[in-house]
Amino acid sequence: MLEVADLHKRFDGNEVLKGVNFKVDKGEVVAVLGSSGSGKTTLLRCISFLEKADRGGIVFGDFHKDITKVKSKEIRQLRMRMGFVFQSYNLFRNKTAIQNVMEGLTVARKTPDAEAKDIAVSMLKKVGMLDRADYYPDQLSGGQQQRVAIARAIATSPEIILFDEPTSALDPELTGEVLDVMKLLAGEGTTMVVVTHEMGFAQSVANRVVFMDGGVIIEDRPSSDFFSNPREESVKRFLRRTMFDYDYSI
């Protein structure tokens, strides 16, 4: 469904991605793990063309191309097939929850207002935010804002949704409500790539875990295998640091 090959990205002389090969099949939930600075967010941003990669190839359905030669029109078309949920929500502060969800439908897809409103109502109901449809972001908690952001992402029926640490800006008590929505989407067969530090989600919901270190992928395995029998020493150390009940002996 989605594949990038030999992906490279450099910032001011610092090579952040060093030849990443990454693939997602339809219906998969892939958790991307790794320490800060390992290249996880940059990978997502290059896939979605929020950052321009320096080198690599991309396959997305029937689209095959050198990622550096994708034209602006093609980027717009590809983005319309993807959803992106940001760590900091990225809601329009001057628009209500329902207006935020409608925005991508009415502006990018020229969906008639009445139809867009019906879709937005349905999506807000799905994420448990219909009773806050007329609230502005500043009137919502972080967890509520992120659920609106997820409603916005799924309103356009994307083929894949990319999540960039969707709970890292939330207090612990608000994290659960966002993860519950993501579990619901996973149960419906939504294709998802989730950069996360939530080990419980990666262990119980993800089909696969990709572990990045130093700008490369060093493990890419089914979730059960990754947690029960990690191969790399850096993965074992990471799990010991992030999982209080992890008892693998290094």
Image: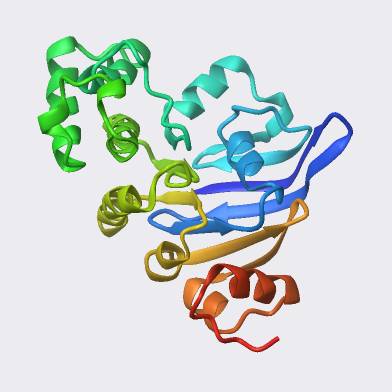
Residue 143 in view here: yes
Q: Position of residue 26 (x, y in %)?
A: 42, 53
**Which residue is more in the foreground, 29 or 65?**
29
Residue 64 in view here: no
**The C terminus lies in which quarter of the figure?**
bottom right
Q: Give me the residue at 16% from left, 41% from top.
A: 128
Q: Position of residue 123 (x, y in %)?
A: 19, 34
Residue that sits furthest to the bottom in the current view = 249
Q: Is residue 176 left or right of residue 192?
A: left
**Which residue is more in the foreground, 153 or 189?**
153
The answer to whether residue 187 is above or below residue 65 is: below
Q: Position of residue 189 (x, y in %)?
A: 30, 55
The answer to whether residue 51 is above or below residue 105 is: below
Q: Is residue 53 left or right of residue 77?
A: right
Q: Give me the residue at 25% from left, 24% from top.
A: 139
Q: Position of residue 183 (x, y in %)?
A: 30, 57
Q: Give me the residue at 56% from left, 67% from top.
A: 242
Q: How many marks?
A: 0
- Quarter where residue 14 is shown: top right
Q: Give me the residue at 89% from left, 33% from top.
A: 13
The answer to whether residue 102 is above or below residue 213 is: above
Residue that sits furthest to the right in the current view = 13
- Quarter where residue 233 is shown: bottom right
